[in-house]
């Protein structure tokens, strides 16, 4: 197996090779290499140099007729579990990785979180509340929110991606991943279009500039 782990501050050359090829594009050439059509028409944006034809139904389609998709894993701290539960989770993960006989990428990405709406709701609740004890608790939450805003709070997300040409095999791999991770006590689902765009944006911009996720009050 040839498996790599990356984060949002490092460009994974292997992943890039899966969705980037100098052979994609039109017959227009630069330095002897073909240019992607989007780069030829508008070279201003980095995204136009990526030979991606589309992102649809949680799948990236590149110009090599490959489909790139995977699963998003919900974080879980297994090290706060009792010893037996932790051991079962680790054994389940070991069995899961041992069943993967194809190239994949384990990606850890940081997404900035926008808590402005949440802070505004707290302020409204604070103004409506007369009980000094509750007001104190709300004020403490607002102070924590200010701390997060001033220190660039991020939400860490975990993905496993792979590429495949055959649609049936792609779906089979997705099902096996989700079921195997469930056996290890982890919840996973197929990547969404927004997930894939966020991952690309993370690699292109080093995690410094893209749309933030939002935190809403419950």
Image (cartoon, helix red, strand yellow):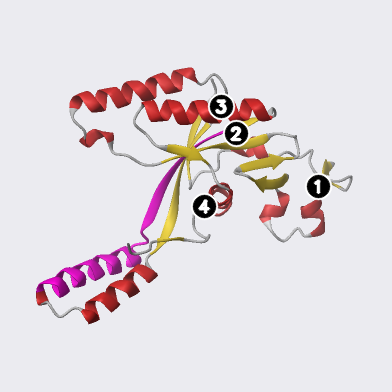
Give the mark nearer the N terminus: 3 vs 1: 1
Residue placed most toward the observer, 100 or 58: 58
Locate residue 65: give its quadrant: top right
* Residue that numbered label 4 is attached to: 206
Q: Residue at point 15% right, 80% down?
A: 130
**Count of numbered marks:** 4
In the rendered image, residue 145 lying in the magenta stretch gets the answer yes
Estimate the x, y position of residue 76 in percent, counting from the top left.
32, 39
Percent from the top left, x then y, of residue 153? 36, 59
Q: Nearer the viewer, residue 172 or 137?
A: 172
Q: Secondary structure at mark 3?
A: helix
Q: Which residue is mark 1?
A: 35
Q: Mark 4: which secondary structure?
A: loop
**How many neighbours does mark 1 have within 10 angstroms: few (below 14), some (14-19), or many (20 or more)?**
many
Does the CB distance between marks 2 and 1 fall below 8 Å?
A: no
Of the numbered discs in the image, which one, if any, rests on residue 173? 3
Range drawn in magenta: 133-162
Q: Earlier in the sequence, mark 4 or mark 3?
A: 3
> Pointer 2: residues within 10 angstroms few (<14), some, or many (20+)?
some
Crowd around label 3: few <14 · some 14–19 · many ≥20 (10 Å): some
Q: Could you say which quadrant of the image residue 78 lies in?
A: top left
Tell me how far mark 2 sits from mark 3, CA to CA.
Answer: 20 Å
Vertical placement of residue 159 versus 125, above or below: above
- Mark 4 to mark 2 CA distance (whole Å): 17 Å
Indicate the secondary structure of the residue bearing disc 2. Answer: helix
Distance between the Cα atoms at labels 2 and 1? 20 Å
Give residue 28's position: percent from left, percent from top. Answer: 88, 48
On the picture, is 92 further left or further right than 4? Answer: left
- Residue that badge 2 annotates: 14
Mark 2 and mark 3 lie on one chain; the one further toward the N terminus is: 2
């Amino acid at each position: 197996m040839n498996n790599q782990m990356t984060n949002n501050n490092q460009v994974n050359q292997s992943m890039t090779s899966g969705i980037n090829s100098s052979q994609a594009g039109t017959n227009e050439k630069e330095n002897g290499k073909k240019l992607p059509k989007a780069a030829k028409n508008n070279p201003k944006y980095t995204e136009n140099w990526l030979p991606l034809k589309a992102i649809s139904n949680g799948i990236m389609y590149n110009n090599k007729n490959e489909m790139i998709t995977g699963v998003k894993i919900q974080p879980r701290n297994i090290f706060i579990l009792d010893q037996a539960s932790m051991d079962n989770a680790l054994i389940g993960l070991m069995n899961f990785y041992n069943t993967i006989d194809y190239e994949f990428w384990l990606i850890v990405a940081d997404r900035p979180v926008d808590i402005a709406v949440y802070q505004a709701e707290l302020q409204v609740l604070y103004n409506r509340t007369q009980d000094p004890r509750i007001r104190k608790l709300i004020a403490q939450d607002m102070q924590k929110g200010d701390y997060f805003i001033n220190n660039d709070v991020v939400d860490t997300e975990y993905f496993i991606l792979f590429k495949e040409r055959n649609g049936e095999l792609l779906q089979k791999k997705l099902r096996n991943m989700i079921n195997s991770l469930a056996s290890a006590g982890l919840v996973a689902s197929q990547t969404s279009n927004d997930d894939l765009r966020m991952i690309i944006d993370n690699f292109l911009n080093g995690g410094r500039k893209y749309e933030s996720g939002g935190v809403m009050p419950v």
